[in-house]
Amino acid sequence: MRWIRSWFPGLDFETYTDKFASSARAVFRQAYEHAKQLGHTQMNDEDVLLAFAQTERSFLDELLKRLNVDKESVLQRLSSNPNQYGVSAGMKISEGLRNVMRHALETARERGRAHIESIDLLIGVFRDERNLSVKLFEELGAGREDVIKIIRELASEYNGVNW
C-alpha cells in the first residue's frame, strides 16, 4: 500500500490496493493523472477505462475491433463525461471504482492469482452493470457479458493465460 500513498498523497484508497501487479498500478496511476488533469475530485470507472486505453492500447484496439465498436466514439464519450469538480484535500475513489477494484480482486482470485492485473481491472469495469462504461458499450451495441467474454479470450491469446 505504500506505493499508492507515495504516488497519490491524500488519496482515499482501499486496503487491497497492495494487491496490484505492475500492470494494474500503471493503469491506476494513469487513471489518477487523467482525473487530476481534468480537475476531478474523484476517480471512477471511466478514468480506469480511459487509462487502460492508453497503457494497453493494442489490447483495447483489438477488443473494440472484435466488438465492432468505434474507438473514437468510446474515447470521446468517456472523455466528455462530466465528473465531480470542487475543492478537495485529495483525490477520492468513487463507489463505482471501489466496486471495480473489488470485482478485479475477485477475478484475480478466481484465476488463482494473488495480484490484480490490468486485465482484471478491465473485467472489473464490466462486471457492474451500473457503470457508465457498461452503459456506453451497450448503447454502442456491445453487451457487458460479450465484452467480458472477449476480454478473457484476448487475455488468453495475449498472455497465454487460462481464462
Image (cartoon, rainbow, N blue to C red):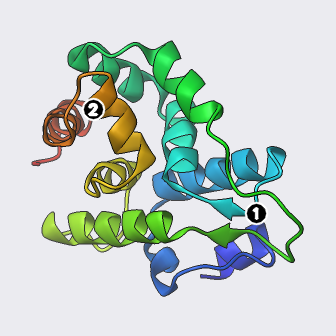
| Disc 1 secondary structure class | loop
Marker disc for residue 41: 1
Mark 1 crowdedness (10 Å alpha carbons): few <14, some 14-19, many ≥20: many
Percent across and percent down for residue 84 are 71, 57
* Quadrant hosting residue 25: bottom right
Mark 2 crowdedness (10 Å alpha carbons): few <14, some 14-19, many ≥20: some
Q: Would residue 69 appear left or right of 23 to someone viewing this image? A: left
Lower position in the chain sequence, tag 2 or tag 1:
1
* Quadrant hosting residue 51: top right
Image quarter in which the N terminus is found: bottom right
Q: Would residue 69 appear left or right of 26 to someone viewing this image? A: left
Q: Would residue 44 appear left or right of 126 to someone viewing this image? A: right
Q: Is residue 73 above or below residue 24?
A: above
C-beta proximity under 8 Å, tags 2 and 1: no
**Mark 2 → mark 1, Cα distance in angstroms:** 27 Å
Foreground of the two, 147 or 82: 82
Percent across and percent down for residue 104 are 33, 63
Q: Is residue 69 above or below residue 31?
A: above
Percent across and percent down for residue 35 are 72, 50
Residue at position x 26%, y 13% in the image: 68
Residue at position x 27%, y 53% in the image: 129
Residue at position x 51%, y 75% in the image: 17
Residue at far bottom of view = 15
* Quadrant hosting residue 103: bottom left
Q: Would residue 7 appear left or right of 151 to someone viewing this image? A: right
| Disc 2 secondary structure class | helix
Marker disc for residue 138: 2
Query: Which residue type does callout 2 highlight?
Result: Glu
Foreground of the two, 63 or 26: 63
Foreground of the two, 60 or 22: 60
Query: Which residue type does callout 1 highlight?
Result: Thr
